[in-house]
């Protein structure tokens, strides 16, 4: 597997035009040293990617936080798309090892420089947009950045039914609590998962959600409701 194919696997996106990804990984220091070879830096892609990232994140927050005023939305967007956040994404993708740097940046630790790595993330977003359109770029942003925010909101918004169920079952140490995937439908950027929860092999509930964690919470809630009904019937 080539370096480009390895990165595509991590991105969960295959480029029709791999040269776009190669450009996204090309720092200006590398391009400046190779002007005769017509190497192009990722600066223009970075400019475009910054706007796409801001738009997708703004729409996400607008829909996910309907009770927030403009000021809170603005602050949250700034936090999500800041250099620190994008640097974290770059580290997860291992972008440093794929960058094309000039000799000076290479010797100066450019592969680990947060600003360079964050810029590369924005450039890759733009490259995906130019190669596959807005839907693919949005899907990439959701996978790398926004799905974690959605799951965090789900778990803080809802009661933690999984913990409640776990604590209930722990009163009987001999019993076994397990979760399993029943179904998975939809495209990568809009998956719907169905999970089941079983105690000693008996299915107590199932639930659906936009993530496995969300579906597990729904399944645990269904299980608690069933156990509550059974307890009332036995009284």
Image: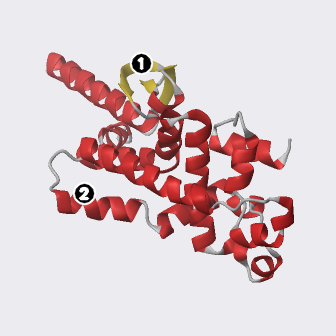
**Residue denoted by label 2:** 73
Color style of the picture: secondary structure
Tell me, yes or no, if residue 159 can be seen here: no
Locate residue 126, reporting x and y percent. 56, 49
Task: Give the alpha-carbon distance from disc 1 to disc 2, as whole Å.
Answer: 41 Å
Q: Quadrant of the C terminus?
A: top left
Identify the residue under disc 1. 203
Could you say which disc has been placed on residue 23 in the image?
A: none
Q: Tell which of 49 and 60 is nearer to you.
A: 49
- The residue at the point 17 percent across, 53 percent down is 68
Give the vertical position of 92 relative to 83 (above or below). above
Residue at the location (38% across, 44% down)? 151
**Residue 192 falls in image quadrant:** top left
Front label number (1 vs 2): 2
Please indicate whether residue 170 sits to the left or right of residue 222 in the image.
Answer: right
**Does label 1 or label 2 sit earlier along the sequence?**
2
Q: Looking at this view, is 21 or 156 the one in front? A: 21
Q: Residue furthest front?
A: 36
Residue 231 shown left or right of residue 11 in the figure = left
Q: Position of residue 173 (x, y in %)?
A: 44, 39
Residue 190's quadrant in the figure? top left
């Amino acid at each position: 597997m080539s370096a480009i194919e390895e990165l595509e696997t991590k991105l969960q996106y295959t480029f029709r035009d791999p040269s776009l990804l190669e450009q996204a990984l090309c720092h200006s220091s590398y391009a400046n040293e190779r002007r005769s070879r017509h190497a192009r830096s990722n600066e223009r892609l970075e400019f475009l990617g910054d706007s796409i990232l801001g738009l997708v994140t703004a729409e996400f927050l607008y829909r996910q936080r309907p009770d927030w005023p403009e000021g809170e939305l603005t602050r949250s967007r700034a936090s999500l798309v800041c250099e620190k956040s994008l640097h974290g994404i770059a580290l997860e993708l291992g972008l440093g090892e794929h960058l094309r740097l000039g000799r000076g940046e290479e010797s100066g630790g450019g592969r680990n420089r947060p600003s360079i790595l964050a810029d590369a993330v924005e450039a890759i977003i733009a490259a995906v947009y130019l190669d596959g359109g807005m839907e693919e770029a949005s899907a990439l942003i959701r996978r790398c950045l926004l799905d974690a925010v959605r799951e965090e909101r789900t778990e803080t918004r809802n009661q933690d039914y999984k913990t409640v169920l776990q604590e209930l079952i722990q009163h009987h140490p001999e019993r076994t609590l397990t979760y399993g995937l029943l179904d998975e439908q939809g495209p990568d950027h809009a998956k719907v998962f169905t999970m089941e929860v079983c105690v000693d092999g008996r299915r107590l509930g199932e639930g659906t959600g936009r993530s496995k964690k969300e579906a597990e919470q729904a399944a645990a809630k269904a299980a608690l409701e069933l156990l509550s009904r059974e307890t009332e019937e036995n009284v």
